[in-house]
Amino acid sequence: MCPRGESGEGDGEKAVGLFAWYPAVQPGGGGFLQNMVTGDGGMAAEGRIAGPYGTGRVAYIDAYDIAASAAVPLTGEVGAGRTYVLTGPEALTHGEIAERLGITYHDVPPAQAAAGLRANGLPERFVAELLALWADMAAGGLAHLTEDVQELTGRRPRTLEEFLRAHPQVSKLFSMFEAEVEAGRVRTSSTQARTVLARWTTPSSAAPGSGAYP
């Protein structure tokens, strides 16, 4: 509950009234591109993508695009009282993401995915929240696209390919993938894997029309 002042009006309510004059910036709920390669829990850390994602499309966004967009209202006058919803530039299925990575996508039944989470010690409440998120994802609830990053920053948000090209750690992902290929567990050629790896790890400048990314 909000603490209440002597006048009977809650301090929290005063704060809401004050900040209603300022623009709000919020992620669109589609997830972060960093999910692909971050740490051992990266979506493709094992050289494949597996989950109960179905064929739903997701508008993944680079976290740096969120930061750059959020900085704009702090440094200039934009859309007082407006809510900016931030998304990536395209909504992709996880099968399409896997294809662009040159790896495989395995659709996992929700019950099997939940069992895996519980086996890893995750609390039941968190498992339930993830199942709800995945169900929404599979139904296409995270596919909405906006142009708010472009409007706020003056440049389009980074694509999946641009993100991967800018992150050298993607080479680790593909080395794991090639090991799978050599072991015969992935139906493609290691030559194809190396071709995709070379394409995405070739040094390049920042995304066209954008400022430099970290």
Image (cartoon, helix red, strand yellow):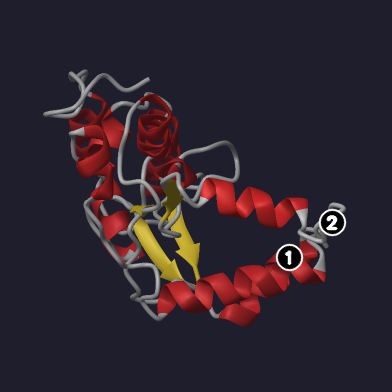
Q: Which quadrant: the C terminus?
A: top left
Residue drawn 33% across the image and 58% down it: 59
Q: Quadrant of residue 97?
A: bottom left
From the viewer's perspective, tell me whether residue 65 is left or right of residue 180.
Answer: left
What's the amino acid at mark 2?
Answer: Arg
Residue drawn 38% across the image and 63% down it: 105
From the viewer's perspective, tell me whether residue 105 is left or right of residue 191.
Answer: right
Name which of mark 1 and mark 2 comes first in the sequence.
2
**Observer-nearest residue: 3 or 143?**
3
Q: In the displayed structure, would residue 120 be above or below residue 63? A: below
Q: Which quadrant: the N terminus?
A: bottom right
The Cα–Cα distance between marks 1 and 2, rounded to whole angstroms, is 33 Å
SS for tag 1?
A: helix
Q: In the displayed structure, would residue 24 be above or below residue 211? A: below
Instruction: Decide: few, some or many residues near mark 2? Use Cα within 10 Å; few <14, some 14-19, many ≥20.
Output: few
**Residue 31's spot in the image, x, y percent?**
45, 54
Q: In the displayed structure, would residue 21 be above or below residue 213? A: below
Residue drawn 59% across the image and 45% down it: 41
